[in-house]
Image (cartoon, coloured by chain):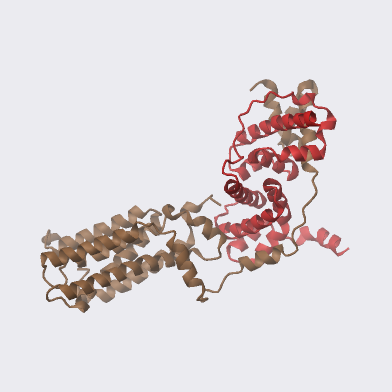
Chain colours: A brown, B red
Amino acid sequence: MNEHEKWHALLPWYVNGTLEERSRIALEAHLQACPTCRQELAVWQHISTAVGVQSALELPHDARSRLSALARPRPWNDPRLIPLLLRSQLHVIRGEIWPASALVLGVGVVVALATGAPAGEMLPFVLIAPIVAAVGISFLYGPAVAPALEIELVTPTPPRLVLLARLLLVFGFDLIVALAGSLALTLFGPDISLGPLIGAWLAPMVFLSALSLLFSVLTADPGAGTLVSLALWTIHALQQLGILNRVLKRLPDLSAAAMRPWILLLAFLIGGLALWLSGREERWMRGQT
Amino acid sequence: MEFAIRTLAMPLFQETDELLIKRVARGDSNALAALHDRHAHVILAYLARITGDEPVAQDLLQETFLAARHGARAFRGRSKVRTWLFGIAHNKAGHWLRRRRPESLDEDDPIVDSGPAVSELADAAWTRERVTAALAQLPQNQRAVLELTFYHGLSCAEVAEVLDCPVGTVKSRAYFARRRLARLLADLDGDE
């Protein structure tokens, strides 16, 4: 950049009157002595006049009322909103979640049938179902689903409701697949009854999913949700299999029948906290608007 | 008369844009309407000039204010509200232009033009009609710099904020815009 170019770069904002005082004074002093820069100033004044004097546009008479209509918050209890919201979130959720969850749960059913594992709560399926749901849930919040930002910005749906819709879709899917798996096990497996089987995986599934969501929301990182739920569930699995029994038997048994009501209550509290936190601030959204 | 009274009394009672944005963030639709009343006409003018299509500009204006409504919680007050709104509008216009013209006209023009030096252009070359015609042929980001600077009176730092680029980039876009304008005006002379 030569001496003149340094001054030329300031001229547009000298002409529009927004140049800060120190630069303006220095530029004016230079202009006094420099015919080249004065010539350049004249050019910018021409451009300024031509660009600045333009016919003003009239706002359409209904612009404000159109905006008000679009921006009006929709009633939360409008049932027409629910299918629309669920359908919109189907496109946002990572496509791999559906086949991966179904596949792993299916493998759980096959392994349980093939190994002829003892009835009830020791089935491999009971260990697999909760962690599959928890891993899927951990991917519902965070920058990976940021493409939804554009949609969220132009729709009046609160972010908490959007996350709840995603949660319903993924958890609902896992629940249906797990129920179908349980039904298959009771039909084809020996001495397995449906009620106790569902009871064995349902409460841990809700609990792990809630925990996974909370950690994803807290860190805006799906990896954190996955890691925490995997760690907890690995400890639980070791406990169930009697490994490291001396240390682990002191910890509460997450699948014990007596624990289920408490685990469910805790899961709802954790899930509620995660949803509340998700609406408070979208960390990765900062500065993107 | 009523307009004059309202205009004179307004500064005494008017809430600042920053307070309005806080109310918008709390879901106050009256505050959004007030912001719209205050800024919609300049944002519309900018959108119309950047897109060159008034009905599209009106749609993008709605999108801009809806996006502002939802992004109000993320507004940190690092820039003026008007600059922030221009930034949203600029993004909306950019998306629309890219969808319409995938080859995109927003490149940072590296062309070293061999046309006449601008100083050789006669004053008569800089008429409003001719410059308007030449402006329409500038890349979007160069046109945006000139529009924001001379039509909307933004400082260099504010233009950088709107376009989400460094101040140096704004200055170089202004430089290339000036070079290209001169060449386009010279070409117009050749055609006439």
Q: Is residue A249 visible?
A: no
Looking at this view, is B71 or A49 the one in front?
A49
Instruction: Tell me where residue A171 appears, x and y as whole percent.
Output: 35, 67
Instruction: Tell me where residue B91 appears, x and y as whole percent.
Output: 59, 48
Image-based side of B68 in relation to A4, left or right: left
Residue shown at 74%/41% (left/top)?
A: B150
Pick the quarter of the image with the C terminus of chain B: top right
Q: In this view, which residue lies farthest toward the front?
A: B191
Above or below, A242 relative to B129: below
Instruction: Tell me where residue B121 appears, x and y as whole percent.
Output: 80, 27
Image-based side of A280 in relation to A14, left or right: left
Pick the quarter of the image with the N terminus of chain B: bottom right
Instruction: Tell me where residue A221 appears, x and y as whole percent.
Output: 38, 53
Which quadrant of the structure image shows residue A248? Answer: bottom left
Looking at this view, is A217 or A25 the one in front?
A217
Which quadrant of the structure image shows residue B185? Answer: top right
Image-based side of A149 in relation to A116, left or right: right
Q: In this view, which residue lies farthest toward the right?
A: B1
Q: How many marks?
A: 0
Above or below, A258 relative to A244: below
Residue shown at 47%/54% (left/top)?
A: A147
